[in-house]
Image (cartoon, rainbow, N blue to C red):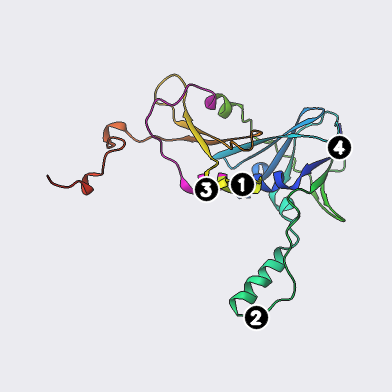
Amino acid sequence: MNAITLSLPYRSLDALTFLASTDTTRPQICGVNVSWRGPMELMLVATDGRRIGLLRETLPEPVAEFSPFLITTELIRLLDRSADLRILHELADRHDMEYWDRPALPNPNARVFVGCDVDAGIMSLTLGRITYQESLARTAFPDVRSVLLTASAAPLAREHVTINPRLLADFSKVADALGCPNCGTALTMVGSHEAHSGVPAVIRVTLPETPNFFGCLMPIRQTDESKREQVGEVPAWLKLES
């Protein structure tokens, strides 16, 4: 289908921007990919090449099958029209000044109307009375099936893995944006690998309070086990002499 219109929760688009790439040399992953999974179901995907988040969305009305398209992070963040107001508030607070206006974020429960016209090459987002438009991204989104196949393998045959804390922290931001009331403790992580040894781990991240979300920290390189201290032991430099 060459032109479609559908609505998505602002909360969902906003949440996945935390996992999208900010590397402008890779424009095909600088946003949220939208793909058709059925007349009443879509899949939203965001990745930066090191982690990935997938969110299943149920539509209020059926939509005909369409080719996947990308909504850029820049366009999604334009929906937060109070960004300039928040900057003014920060400046006012910094200089102990009063500011009469109050910043107002979009209602997290609001639905954003998404328009994609392939023939015209235009992507649009409408929230309330304001519509933002951009040129439709023509580059292909990466195939995520290989990552999901690895994540579906047997449980990780290691007692511990190494995780980049900054990357993991963004999953907490996703949980918060999706409205998980206990976002600070809502991450469940399970390591997995393929049957043969030596394959880096994929860390599966799920949100117990949002079963429609699934995330992965991409394969990471493991260090040599022979050079690593036993898991759970006190570091040698902390051990007390008897």
Name the residue beneath numbered marker 3: 169
Q: Which residues are magenta?
A: 150-171
**Residue ID at (44%, 41%):** 163
Q: Looking at the picture, how far across and down is residue 96, in whole percent?
A: 61, 80
Name the residue beneath numbered marker 2: 97
**Residue ID at (50%, 35%):** 189
Give the number of the mark in front: 4 or 3: 3
Answer whether residue 21 is visible to the viewer in this image.
Answer: no
Q: Looking at the picture, how far across and down is residue 46, in whole percent?
A: 64, 40
Crowd band around label 3 with a 10 angstrom C-alpha radius: few (<14), some (14–19), many (20+): few
Q: CA distance from mark 4 to mark 3?
A: 35 Å
Name the residue beneath numbered marker 1: 181
Q: CA distance from mark 1 to mark 3?
A: 16 Å
On whether residue 169 falls in the magenta region, the answer is yes
Q: Amino acid at mark 1?
A: Pro
Name the one closer to the observer, 145 or 234: 234
Pointers 4 and 1 in contact (CB under 8 A)?
Answer: no
The kind of secondary structure element at disc 4 is strand
Pointers 1 and 3 in contact (CB under 8 A)?
Answer: no
Crowd band around label 1 with a 10 angstrom C-alpha radius: few (<14), some (14–19), many (20+): few
The kind of secondary structure element at disc 2 is loop
Q: Residue furthest top?
A: 195
11 left or right of 26?
right
Q: Amino acid at mark 3?
A: Ala
